[in-house]
Image (cartoon, rainbow, N blue to C red):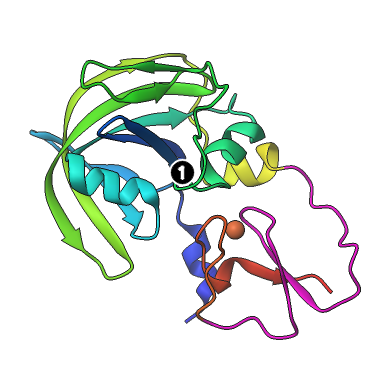
Amino acid sequence: MDNQAMFALSYGLFVVTARDGDKDNGCITNTVGQVTSSPNRISLTVNKLNYTHDMIVHSGQFNVSVLSENATFDLFQRFGFQSGRNTDKFAGFSGVRRTVNGLYYVTVGVSAWLSAKVVQSIDLGSHTMFIADVTDGGMLSLVPSATYTYYQAHIKPAPVKPTTAKPAWRCKICGYIYEGEVLPADFVCPICKHGAADFEKIS
Ligand code: FE
């Protein structure tokens, strides 16, 4: 198997937001897709380590903000490179509004939003796949939605040269540096939760 073949798959990018009690959170994902049109249903797959995962399990609903090519890297830092368990990702951030279900959606760097209600959860081991009815939605701009390839080429800053001479690996998704000669095969990036396949040796 040529593992590079998996990188030929194309993905969109999304901020998924949820609310549990009076706590809001959101995370970046590339795993939203429509599964049926009648009823209008989408699937969302979330790593169980993500705080947003548990909030969706408890509340049974989530919003999807579809990132556009106008999305800036700080959106990815805010929602992708920190955990809602120990930070309020919405602190000092004015680019949000609430939908009628009470959840936030993001209004900047976003082409459209959807509200969804979970109708089925599938346990995939490390992840849960949520199947959800789309209950509402709206357009915010006609700027094309960002693909994962577009993010890699145009949104993510160029990598900086490592300052360490020690053997190290860099996460190609978020830039996290793992120091060590050998990266364990089951290593999971503590920042973005991607696996060892998304790391490259840098020194
Ligand atoms: Fe990472």
Question: In the image shown, does 97 or 135 lie closer to the viewer?
Answer: 97
- Amino acid under label 1? Gly
Q: Which residue is drawn at 22% across and 15% down?
A: 100
Name the one closer to the observer, 158 or 63.
Answer: 63
Magenta span has 97? Answer: no
Residue placed under numbered mark 1 in the picture? 84
The image quadrant that residue 104 belongs to is top left
Count of numbered marks = 1
In percent of the image, x 38 and y 22: which residue is there? 112
Dot 1 alpha-carbon crowd within 10 angstroms: few under 14, some 14 to 19, many 20 or more: many
Ligand 1 resides in the quarter of the picture at bottom right
Q: Is the magenta stretch mostly helix, strand or loop?
A: loop
Quarter location, residue 199: bottom right
Left or right side of 144 for 137: left
- Figure check: 125 above or below 145: below
- The image shows residue 88 at horizontal and vertical percentages of 49, 35
Q: Which residue is drawn at 43% across and 37% down?
A: 14
Name which residue lies at 30% across and 43% down: 33
Counting from the top left corner in percent of width and height, residue 102 is at: 25, 21
Instruction: Please say whether residue 163 is one of the residues in the magenta stretch.
Output: yes
* 72 lies left or right of 91: right
Q: Residue 106: x, y in percent? A: 44, 23
What stretch of residues is rendered in magenta? Answer: 157-185
Task: Confirm if mark 1 falls within 8 A of ligand 1.
Answer: no
Residue 3 image point, x, y percent: 51, 74
Please tell me whether mark 1 sits on a helix, a strand or a loop. loop
